[in-house]
Image (cartoon, grey):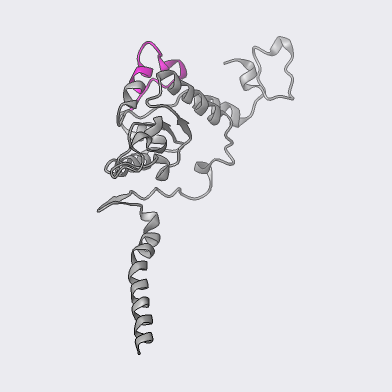
Amino acid sequence: MASNEINTPGYDVPAEMQAQVAITTLDKIYNWSRKNSVWPMMFGLACCAIEMIGAAASRYDISRFGMEVMRPSPRQADLMIVSGTVTKKMIPQIVRLYNQMPEPRYVIAMGACASGGGPFKEGYSVVSGVDKFIPVDVYIPGCPPSPQALIHGFLVLMKKIEGESLRKVRWYQKGPSEPIPVPVLGPDLMDPRKYALIKEITHRPAEMEVQEQDQTGEVEG
């Protein structure tokens, strides 16, 4: 690690001691260690997953960034790469996997489909962006994006991790963090957080019809 990455500006270390002494903060040393040891979760959804696999292969070699350990279990991963089309049938499993990941955890939406639905946007079976259900930290455009684009997304995420403060990030606040409710796939995809709104909308036509009938009866009377 270069000394300029860890030293805190404003505290000058004598030239003869710069290779031996570093003056830094807990945030810097902690974030430096985390950004260089991010473990992605091993799963893919569609064609973007092929580019993700290519980024992990020998030509691009994401082990340069400490990210080569793709874990098959969410409990051992801290980065979810949503690579491909997110269908309404798949989003409950994605949310369930996200809830099982330990904090701190991050999400990359890889490609147009994961970011906003892509060419299938507004399709009857497709979710228009995974960010409607889980928080996304980095968006990577493209259909599909190249391995170089994914690596750039890794660098952006590392920059974000580097700038975080232990006092402000949500997973170090007081009290337990609430899991995201798993969507329910019925006649359509329903978000438990929007049950009240769904109930209001579904009952509104019936209530308006009753009011119209009452007004018609009063006029006829």
Q: Can residue 78 be seen here?
A: no
Residue 195, relative to residue 98: is it above or below? below
Q: Is residue 54 magenta?
A: yes
Image coords of residue 211 (percent x, y): 37, 77
Q: Quadrant of residue 134?
A: top left
Residue 31, relative to residue 182: is it above or below? above
Quarter of the picture containing the C terminus is: bottom left
Quarter of the picture containing the N terminus is: top right
Residue drawn at x 65%, y 18% is 4
Q: Is residue 111 magenta?
A: no
Direction from residue 19 to residue 174 in the image, left or right: left
- Residue situated furthest bottom in the rendering: 221
- The residue lying toward the viewer, choosing from 101 and 25, is 101
Image coords of residue 205 (percent x, y): 35, 67
Q: How many marks?
A: 0
Direction from residue 220 to residue 23 in the image, left or right: right
Image coords of residue 215 (percent x, y): 38, 81
Q: Which residues are magenta?
A: 52-71
- The residue lying toward the viewer, choosing from 153 and 171, is 153
Residue drawn at x 44%, y 26% is 38
- The residue lying toward the viewer, choosing from 155 and 97, is 155
Residue 72, relative to residue 87: is it above or below? above
Q: Quadrant of residue 122?
A: top left
Image coords of residue 8 (percent x, y): 68, 25
Q: Can residue 37 be seen here?
A: yes
Residue drawn at x 33%, y 79% is 213
Direction from residue 11 to residue 209 in the image, left or right: left
Residue drawn at x 40%, y 19% is 147
